[in-house]
Image (cartoon, rainbow, N blue to C red):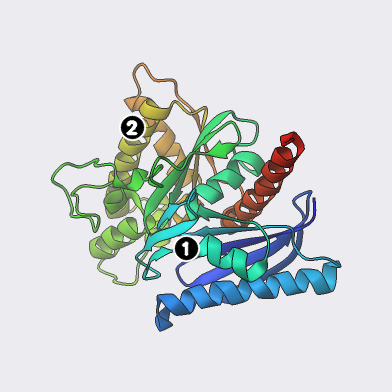
Amino acid sequence: MRHVIALDVGGTGMKAALVGPDGELLHQDRRATGRERGPDAVVAAILDFAAELRAYGEQHLGEPPAAAGVAVPGIVDERAGVAVYAANLGWRDVPLRALLADRLSIPVALGHDVRTGGLAEGRLGAGRGADRFFFVALGTGIAGGFGLDGRVESGAHGFAGEIGHIVVRPQGAPCPCGQRGCLERYASAAAVSEAWAKACGDPDADAADCAKAVTSGDPNAVRVWGEAVAALADGLVTAVTLLDPRVLIIGGGLAEAGDVLFEPVRDAVRARVTFQKLPSIVPAELGDTAGCLGAGLLAQDLLTTTTTTAEVTP
């Protein structure tokens, strides 16, 4: 198996790598998405960046990449290869897989950014060896991915894993999705930052500041943090009840608080379960490389599937 392109597209930046067959990162690079110029400019930037990566592989590694994996935010129809919608990039119904395949002349796999990061965590990171895991990313919003036997479920329409839009506080704070009381309005890094800035009177204060204040015993910080932990535990218990994962992996910016988050979350989930089996609750291991590594796995899986199909086709 030759090297592959791995591309992780975020709201403002893109991370990319050329990945060898053993998972080695042979080359890494970053680019801005150029979203301030509109969705067409973002698509053009992705295509140009991927073409540069292909050219680098040919020039420096002696051969072109064999495939490409691309992870993007928002709603993704992975089977059709379409980036359906992303609010932070402004695009709708972009046939990104076809556009990239045409530009690169190699097979391309398209995935959802959080599910792709979950794939990497499941195979290479905190969930390796587990037959079933649930990965949750606590960032500006909250999303997740359910891993089963080495793959991450995307759902019938590309919506699987959207734990951030489980209603944990009925009739609570309005959410941009149209519901009220969604988990991400209480337990995302953005929500904690907003609540702590209001509580402490500093508009520049964020979730990391709140975590530091918790360790010093600030009662307002303890209250804000406790409310976020309670909401998160309610959402996680819902996931545990529905999916029965063996390992529950938590990543994203809020998880960087370490034990300040994980100790009370473990206690709160334990206090809420009744008949359910309590999974291991562990921090993600791969950090901001997870999306890129996962995109590489998507590309390598594509090659494995293609090879297997070719071998059994008469």
Q: State the residue in front, 248 or 22.
A: 22
The residue located at (36%, 43%) in the rendering is 163
* Residue that sits furthest to the front in the current view: 314
Mark 1 or mark 2: name the one nearer the start of the chain: 1
Q: Residue under circle 1? A: 95
Q: From mark 1 to mark 2, how far is it between C-alphas?
A: 34 Å
Residue 242: x and y in percent read: 37, 28
**Secondary structure type for disc 2:** helix
* Residue that sits furthest to the bottom in the current view: 37
Front of the two marks 1 and 2? 1
| Amino acid type for the residue under numbered disc 2 | Thr
Q: State the residue in front, 312 or 166.
A: 312
Q: Residue under circle 2? A: 238
For this view, does 149 lie left or right of residue 157? right
* Residue that sits furthest to the right in the current view: 62
Q: Place residue 5 in its image quadrant.
A: bottom right
| Amino acid type for the residue under numbered disc 1 | Pro
Q: State the residue in front, 225 or 212.
A: 225
The residue located at (24%, 40%) in the rendering is 168
Q: Is residue 262 visible?
A: yes
In the image, residue 296 above or below residue 280 = below
